[in-house]
Image: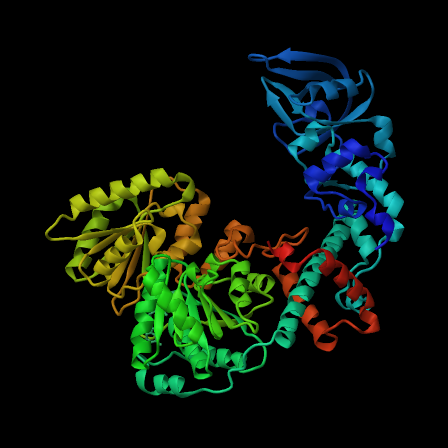
């Protein structure tokens, strides 16, 4: 890159130290090139001029030619002032109003000078006014580089108040182009430009800032979006290749006694086709000399646990230890109970380590881990503590990955010279487009089939006013011997209120379902782990009929006899959470139900969420809707690993471009992985530039 583009922004004509400081602080613009890469949010039509008598309330921004004939300061309320200017043209008059930066504005205003104002109009008591308008002298206005569509840049209140309006940014951008545009170099190979009919980089940058037409703008956007996604994919895929070739892993060459014995004699059920396929994928992957990094996606209840267990058997068969890490103590315990049953049949030494493991038990675990006699360790975050040292960890399974960050993943792996294979299991289905942009460095296996005999869960939406009917339904189900979950929201910000809701709910449920006919469990985050476990056990042993709980039961809990999930204030849950909760039922042979309780007042997003839940059980479909509703940044499962921090592309709207970018990146790396060919020289230098400054995870978190 040319040095000029690396010039500090304050040296640009029109910037200077003060504005430079503001641009740095407010928009992160340090150098010339950062300004070039400040892409507009939208564009407005500046070919049309309005007359004052044509104004209508709240239309989008308008521009008007006229002059200021009067300026005054008006007090309103105690000590509050606003600056008001009267603006006229040949059809009428209106007011321009400033609440902030009044001193600075007042100094810059000129009376009786023909000017162009630009902004949003509102009417108040029959008169029109424009707050914080942009003003430009007509003489200046005529000189400026004007295109049919004018860019509107991201801004901040501070910038506006300090006089760096959109017009100023536009001006700076023009200046920058005057000084530097001959220096913009192409970043993509010629053949790719031709193949995809992409416009050159220079033209794209020009048209993104000063579009000559809608068509030119569309081409510029396409080119820049493609480029952005392409280089990210190039990095992710390279990283994956490097891992495959360079990061050594333990080759699990044999399928041994434990695996075979289990497969032939102790399988508790027939594996589904999807489970078999996925086990094969994992086995093949762990059989090579490279480390496995695999994401196992499968809807709730699809049977990921047995896949994890059989993968662990492969590790054991090859003389290695294995561990499974769960996000909560409840879940770790459940895994431990379930897996111990299987492991004991094979005489495997399996133990559990969590925050509440006693010191004496810990000691034994540490010892056995180091001398290698402990074969499988189940646990929570406690597994990441320094004292936990495996003799030879061969496979680490991480359940419900969205609770663990990328860093934690690698923490496990630092414990050994040769890292263990990693299997990350998630029940949060991540749409493919998102998965491939986020986890380009992971391979993905999908269990897309539920075990046979499951009846799809029936989901209904009921208003609070129908509670009596819902309660009757519960009584009937309990009469049939089934168990019920009733879940209350627990959101961090309003924890106290939520807790009160939970307790109120518990009390009224206790009244409506009194002892001795009914018994009720309660589970929430404030309970001691031992009490939680005891309550959970009472429920799973069938000693209580109803479990009143917060979302602590969200993850992984398995009570096949529970057939009804009631979600209170369902409008307060996100889609993926609703889907997770619903997955707690439908685990046995009985018909299961999910009842979403809400108030009558629902936002349109909430309505969509309820309708989606009622209409489908398919986690991937739900994830797609969620992605559309919330945008990728808020999607569960992407929070910790973060989501692409993109400048121009949007992985939801631009998923087709993403797929194209990925395809091209793969194609190029397949024929020229280190980018050595002469036609890839430019690519290589851009790539090096990118990776030098930006670790790929900077994009992603
Ligand atoms: P998840 O993928 O949500 O972790 P689990 O592994 O907990 O699902 O499995 C859910 C339930 O389905 C468990 O009770 C498990 O024993 C059962 N299960 C798993 N695979 C099968 C299968 N192939 N046939 C019958 N039941 C199965
Ligand atoms: Mg599970």
Question: Outermost residue toward the left?
Answer: 516
What is the quadrant of residue 406 in the picture? bottom right
The one of 136 and 349 positioned closer to us in this rendering = 349
Residue 454 in the image, given as x and y percentages of width and height = 31, 70
Kindly identify the residue that appears in the image at 64 percent across and 55 percent down: 699
Where is residue 237 drawn, in percent x and y?
65, 68
Note whether residue 600 is visible: no
- Of residue 252 and residue 239, the one placed in the foreground of this image is 252
Res 698 → quadrant: bottom right
Determine if residue 669 is in view. yes
Q: How many marks?
A: 0
Whether residue 212 sits left or right of residue 266 in the image: it is: right
Q: Quadrant location of residue 511?
A: top left
Q: Could you say where residue 600 lies in the image, as x and y percent from the top left? A: 35, 41
Residue 469 coordinates in the image, percent (x, y): 21, 48
Q: Residue at x 69, y 22 (%)?
A: 101
Q: Is residue 214 left or right of residue 698?
A: right
Relative horizontal placement of residue 572, taking residue 646 as reference (left or right): left
Please determine whether, in this image, residue 612 is positioned above or below residue 290: above
Rendered view: 429 above or below 309: above
Q: Residue at x 67, y 31 (%)?
A: 158
- Is 192 drawn above or below residue 567 in the view shown? below
Residue 395 higher or lower than 410, as above or below: below
Image quarter hosting the N terminus: bottom right
The chosen color scheme is: rainbow
In the image, taking residue 432 as reference, residue 659 lies left or right, namely: right
């Amino acid at each position: 890159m040319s040095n000029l583009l690396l010039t500090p922004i304050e040296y640009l004509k029109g910037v200077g130290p003060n504005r430079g400081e503001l641009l740095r602080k407010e928009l992160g613009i340090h150098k010339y090139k950062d300004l070039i890469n400040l892409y507009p949010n939208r564009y407005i039509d500046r070919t049309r001029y309005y007359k004052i008598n044509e104004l209508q309330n709240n239309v989008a921004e308008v521009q008007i030619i006229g002059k200021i004939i009067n300026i005054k300061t008006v007090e309103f309320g105690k000590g509050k002032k606003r600056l008001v200017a009267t603006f006229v043209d040949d059809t009428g008059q209106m007011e321009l109003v400033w609440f902030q930066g009044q001193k600075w504005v007042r100094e810059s205003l000129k009376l009786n000078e023909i000017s162009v104002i630009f902004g949003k109009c509102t009417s108040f008591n029959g008169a029109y006014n424009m707050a914080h308008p942009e003003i430009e002298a007509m003489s200046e206005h005529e000189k400026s580089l004007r295109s049919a569509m004018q860019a509107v840049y991201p801004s901040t209140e501070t910038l506006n108040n300090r006089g760096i309006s959109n017009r100023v940014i536009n001006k700076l951008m023009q200046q920058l182009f005057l000084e530097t545009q001959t220096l913009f170099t192409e970043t993509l190979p010629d053949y790719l430009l031709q193949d995809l009919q992409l416009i050159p980089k220079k033209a794209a940058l020009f048209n993104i800032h000063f579009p000559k037409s809608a068509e030119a703008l569309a081409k510029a956007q396409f080119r820049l979006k493609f480029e952005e996604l392409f280089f990210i994919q190039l990095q992710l895929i390279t990283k994956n290749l490097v891992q495959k070739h360079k990061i050594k892993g333990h080759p699990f060459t044999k399928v041994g006694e434990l695996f075979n014995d289990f497969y032939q004699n102790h399988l508790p059920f027939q594996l589904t086709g999807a489970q078999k396929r996925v086990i094969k994928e994992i086995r093949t992957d762990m059989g090579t000399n490279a480390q496995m990094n695999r994401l196992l996606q499968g809807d709730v209840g699809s049977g990921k646990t047995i896949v994890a267990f059989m993968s662990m058997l492969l590790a054991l068969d090859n003389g290695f230890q294995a561990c499974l890490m769960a996000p909560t103590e409840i879940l770790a315990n459940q895994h431990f109970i379930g897996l111990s049953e299987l492991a004991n049949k094979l005489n495997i030494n399996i133990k559990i380590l969590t925050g509440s493991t006693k010191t004496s038990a810990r000691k034994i675990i540490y010892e056995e881990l180091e001398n290698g006699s402990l074969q499988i360790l189940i646990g929570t975050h406690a597994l990441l503590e320094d004292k936990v040292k495996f003799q030879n960890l061969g496979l680490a399974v991480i359940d419900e990955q969205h609770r663990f960050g990328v860093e934690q993943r690698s923490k496990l792996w630092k414990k050994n010279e040769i890292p263990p294979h990693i299997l990350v299991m998630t029940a949060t289905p991540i749409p493919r487009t998102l998965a491939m942009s986020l986890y380009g460095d992971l391979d993905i296996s999908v269990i897309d089939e539920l075990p046979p005999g499951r009846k799809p869960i029936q989901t209904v939406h009921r208003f609070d006013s129908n509670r009596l009917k819902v309660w009757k339904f519960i009584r009937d189900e309990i009469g049939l011997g089934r168990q019920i979950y009733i879940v209350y929201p627990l959101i961090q910000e309003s924890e106290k209120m939520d807790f009160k809701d939970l307790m109120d709910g518990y009390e009224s449920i206790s009244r409506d379902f009194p002892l001795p006919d009914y018994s009720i469990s309660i589970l929430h985050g404030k309970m001691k782990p031992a009490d939680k476990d005891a309550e959970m056990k009472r429920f799973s042993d069938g000693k209580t009929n109803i479990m009143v709980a917060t979302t602590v039961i969200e993850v992984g809990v398995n009570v096949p006899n529970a057939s009804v999930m009631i979600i209170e204030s369902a409008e307060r849950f996100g889609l993926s959470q609703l889907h997770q909760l619903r997955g707690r039922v439908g685990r046995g042979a009985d018909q299961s139900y999910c009842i979403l309780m809400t108030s009558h007042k629902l936002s349109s997003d909430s309505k969509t969420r309820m309708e989606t839940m009622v209409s489908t059980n398919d986690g991937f479909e739900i994830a797609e809707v969620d992605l559309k509703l919330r945008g990728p940044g808020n999607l569960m499962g992407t929070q910790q690993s973060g989501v692409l921090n993109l400048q121009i592309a949007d992985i939801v709207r631009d998923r087709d471009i993403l797929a194209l970018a990925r395809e091209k990146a793969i194609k190029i790396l397949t024929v020229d992985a280190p980018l050595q060919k002469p036609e890839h020289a430019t690519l290589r230098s851009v790539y090096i530039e990118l990776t030098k400054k930006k670790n790929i995870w900077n994009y992603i978190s």
